[in-house]
Amino acid sequence: MEKRLLMAMLLSMAVLLLIPFLYQRLEPPPPPAVVETPEEQEVEERRAAPEPPPERVSRETPSSSEPLSPTQGQDRKIQVENDDMVLTWSSTGARLESVHLKRYSNESGEPVELLVQGLSETFPRPMQLRLDDEELDLELATSPFEVTGAAAGRVQAPAQIAFSYRSQGLLVEEEISIPGSGHTLDVRTRVELGGRPASYSVLLGPGIGEADPEGGASTDFWWPSVAYYAAGSMEKYEASDLAEGAHRIETAARWVAVDSKYFTYVVAGPGEIRAARLSAVPLAGLDGSEEDETLLVLGEAEFRGTARYTLFLGPKDQEELVLADPTLGDIIDYGWFDLLVRPLLYCLKLTYAYVGNYGVAIIVLTFLINLALFPLRYKQIVSMKKMAELQPKVRSIQDRYKRMKRTDPRRQQMNAEMMGLYKKHGVNPLGGCLPLVIQMPFLFAFYRMLDSSIELRAAPFMGWIQDLSRHDPYYITPVVMGASMVVQQKMTPAAGDPMQRRMMMLLPVVFTFFFLNLSSGLVVYFLFSNLFAMMLQVLMQRLKPELAPKRKSSPKKTRKK
């Protein structure tokens, strides 16, 4: 029976894990409907029109246009600040050098830095334009651009700044509109060689985020990857996936992104991005003097001529991402339990809007889940009570066959008699495990939600728990949770043989050690799930005393005369 019970639990877990995976494979979500603006329709018509075959254009290509006057730019920094971020550009190469997110703090209490810092000058930078011609590309990356709209060097948004570069037949223009708030920028670029539209790439990377104070990647930027969205689906690649070579997407992409656990930056240009290239570059030492085996992901969105696109720089907040592009919400990866996580997160945020504390919101949501599972818990108590009452008869059957070897064919008759006994009294031997199996998907969903949702990052609960996405620093809640499991088992009618009961008593110890380093929000969920289950169990036993476990009566001692 113990083997069958264990096998049934494992099969139930396998089914629960495989259902979301199979659903996503067999029924992929349809691509969201996109409402095209007049500008996007114009872009589509221009792309559909026949164009001359691509050819390599050099600066000596004859052109009927007048010669361009060389750029008279200077190397300087341009800083633009709005309500949510501080952006710093370098006029050399018109590259983005820093993005400070004002609403999010790192472990040092300073605004989070979205871009990798301290790289050598040979590394490309985000928003830098790359040309096919290596000589022109190097010239563009190392030459100062002319800057308009930021005469003082520091600008308060809303603002619009423009970079331009001219050198004989090469013309590069870039206009950036920064709103007064938010993390989304509108960009227009134009690149011509010899008076004709030229192909170019907008770079994303290398890498994402800042290092923690002890070195290495900050937990905010774990699992760095480069992603793209094309043909109605998203694909992600980590640096290890690109170690053997770059991956090129020849079809039009909707967006290209460099992604991490909580933050991302994206170039989104529906109908504008003609192709994409994903790669990983080896990280040289921060001072450029030594080699480092670490790989940084790099993305390139390819355009031609004049293009308009959106640049998103910020947190993986569902609402903000969807405002930037309707499909960007897919970049938040909740794994197989995505179908369960998103409704849970919506309910959690809705509850938070009323209570103002995510820890309290988790407790409220836990109560509602336990209330929904109450009928199953009732059946569990009834089933375990019947199992406890049948134990004398079960032991009687086992005693008749206990001298037989396990390989004896007659042992099968024992199992048949026991199953007949359960069937006669309407008892399901697995009924006591059903609520735990049903609760496991919620446990995994809470784990994914707490581990990947920016809303829970640095969300305080009470006292010593100031970040629900991290583990309890003093391990108080995991120990209390283990104790609650012990009390809950004492309140439940004992079923099964002594060996099975001893195995069940080990579960609190296993769960306590398992939860020690998991997020405190997940421990709070499981702890209060146990507490609410005990409250409902006490209520049931008060309404139906026959469901309460019988106390063992101790034999009366007689005094010797």
Image (cartoon, helix red, strand yellow):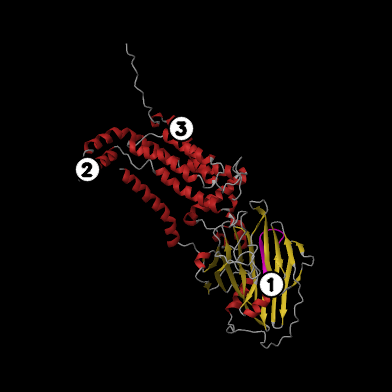
Amino acid at pointer 3 = Val
- Could you say whether the residue bearing mark 3 is in a helix, strand or loop? helix
Q: Which residue is mark 3?
A: 538
Q: Kindly report the distance in space between the C-alpha atoms of the residues bearing marks 2 and 3.
A: 43 Å
- Could you say whether the residue bearing mark 1 is in a helix, strand or loop? loop
Asked whether 33 or 385 is in front, the reply is: 385
Say which mark, if any, is on residue 405: 2
Question: Residue 297 at what x, y percent from top left?
Answer: 56, 66
Asked whether 539 or 554 is in front, the reply is: 554
> Which residue is located at x 49 percent, y 56 percent?
335
Query: Residue farthest to the front?
Result: 289
Amino acid at pointer 1 = Gly
Q: Which residue is mark 1?
A: 93
Query: Is residue 164 left or right of 322 when viewed as pictured?
Result: right
Q: Inspect this view and state whether residue 516 appears.
A: yes
- Quadrant of the image occupied by residue 375: top left
Q: Kindly report the distance in space between the C-alpha atoms of the residues bearing marks 1 and 3.
A: 70 Å
Quadrant the N terminus occupies: top left
Contact (CB < 8 A) between labels 2 and 1? no
